[in-house]
Image (cartoon, helix red, strand yellow):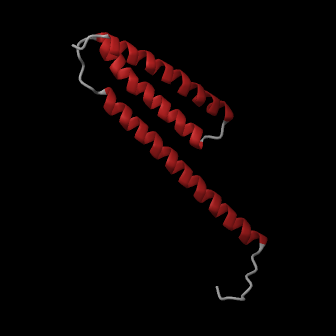
Amino acid sequence: MTPGRVVILTVGALAAIAATSASGLAAMSAQGFGAQMADAMTRMHQAMMAPQSGDPDRDFAAMMIPHHQGAVEMAQAELAYGKDERLRRLAQAIIVEQNQEIAVMRQALAERKKP
């Protein structure tokens, strides 16, 4: 565009620009959400595959901690990208409850003798 030149956009052109921008933002948001969820799932699955000790209580806690941490990370993605207030409230509850359960399992592991 050259200086001093006036560009007149029709209402239709403005609507098209707005729609393109909105769809672009939605696509970026979806990619961010998808990437965050995929990262959480990858970390969770890798950590859950730790070698077992033969102690069912220890192994249960050791595998469930990353499972719960994955749920926390997925709930954080919902809070970052989700719009449904019911699901956002559920995500908030998941974060609180899963973190409390992680703390219980970590304490139980700390109190157990190592194999």
Q: Picture coordinates of residue 80 (x, y %)? A: 57, 42
Vertical side of 106 occupied by 81: above or below? below
In the picture, residue 21 is in which quadrant? bottom right
Q: Position of residue 43 (x, y in %)?
A: 36, 36
- The residue located at (23%, 23%) in the rendering is 51
Nearer to us in this view, 46 or 113: 113
Q: How many marks?
A: 0
Q: In this picture, is 35 found above or below 52?
A: below
Query: Which of the image's four quarters has the N terminus?
Result: bottom right
Q: In percent of the image, x 58 and y 43: which residue is there?
A: 81
Left/right placement of residue 38 relative to residue 47 reads: right
- Residue at 64 percent of width and 29 percent of height: 89
Q: Which quarter of the figure is the C terminus placed in? A: top left
Picture residue at 49% right of the left edge, 30% below the top: 72
Residue located farthest toward the right when viewing the structure as drawn: 11
User: Residue 53: image x %, image y %?
Assistant: 23, 16
- Residue 93, how many percent across, how many down? 59, 25
